[in-house]
Image (tube, rainbow, N blue to C red):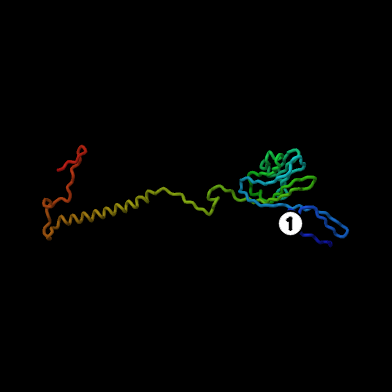
Amino acid sequence: MSPNESVVLNRSNINDQGLYGLTCGSEEKRIHLNVITSSEKSVPEGQAAGFTFHYFTAGELGRYRVERNTQLVFELDLSSGSTSQGSGFENRTSVAPHWRSDGDLTLTLQGVKPEDRGDYFLYVLKDRKRGHLQAVRMRVSPAVNTPEERNPDQITCTPQPPCKETLWIPLSITAALVLVALGVVCRQRICRSHVSPGGGRSLTEEESQPITDPRVPEENGHASSA
């Protein structure tokens, strides 16, 4: 290699991790490359976020650390089990109580806030070297409280009880039609009673025949005839 030259590794994968030696003239430099597995997640505000991490913890020394944008979030001493939390994350971070027996170091962050968004790095610090480095980019979405906020495209209509005024409208129309029909019938009957078939004089009250024979009011449940 010549001075001011560099080596670029495109489309790196987990198998590219390891120790690299760069030689320039008589000078040799060794660089250890760590390939980070990264992921993204979106968590609603106020909910809990989980950062999955597994490590061989049986008899291991070192410290398990979680950082956000280079600032401490959580640290666990793998030998003593003591923990510490970064500023702003007090009483909000934890790992499973059985982490030592099964190697599950998944971190749980309670009550996610908008300011918690960012890049999280999870790793084990041993002999001043970081191992098993993982990265998670977390986004914080607005809190979900109501059905409308869960699905803004869905519009629900609540049935309303029938209004009394809307019921009176068809009843009024029906009553008006009945009155008009009765008026027409009564007018025809009056005309028949006052005009003779031959166009003569009007019949007297005694000469006119009743249109209907009214029934006598019922007595003791039986109707009597005249």
Residue 81 pos. (x, y %): 73, 38
Residue 36 pos. (x, y %): 73, 52
> What residue does disc 1 label?
12
User: In this view of the protein, which residue sits in the foreground, 21 or 80?
Assistant: 21
- Residue beneath the point at 11% across and 50% down: 206
Residue situated furthest top in the rendering: 220
Q: Amino acid at mark 1?
A: Ser
Q: Quadrant of the N terminus?
A: bottom right
- Residue beneath the point at 31% across and 53% down: 174
Q: Is residue 176 left or right of residue 133?
A: left
Q: Quadrant of the C terminus?
A: top left
Q: Is residue 213 left or right of residue 75?
A: left
- Residue beneath the point at 53% across and 54% down: 153
Label 1: state its secondary structure.
Answer: loop
Residue 170 sits above or below residue 63 on the image: below
User: In this view of the protein, which residue sits in the foreground, 92 or 38?
Assistant: 38
> In the picture, residue 61 is in which quadrant?
top right
Residue situated furthest bottom in the rendering: 2
Residue 135 pos. (x, y %): 70, 50
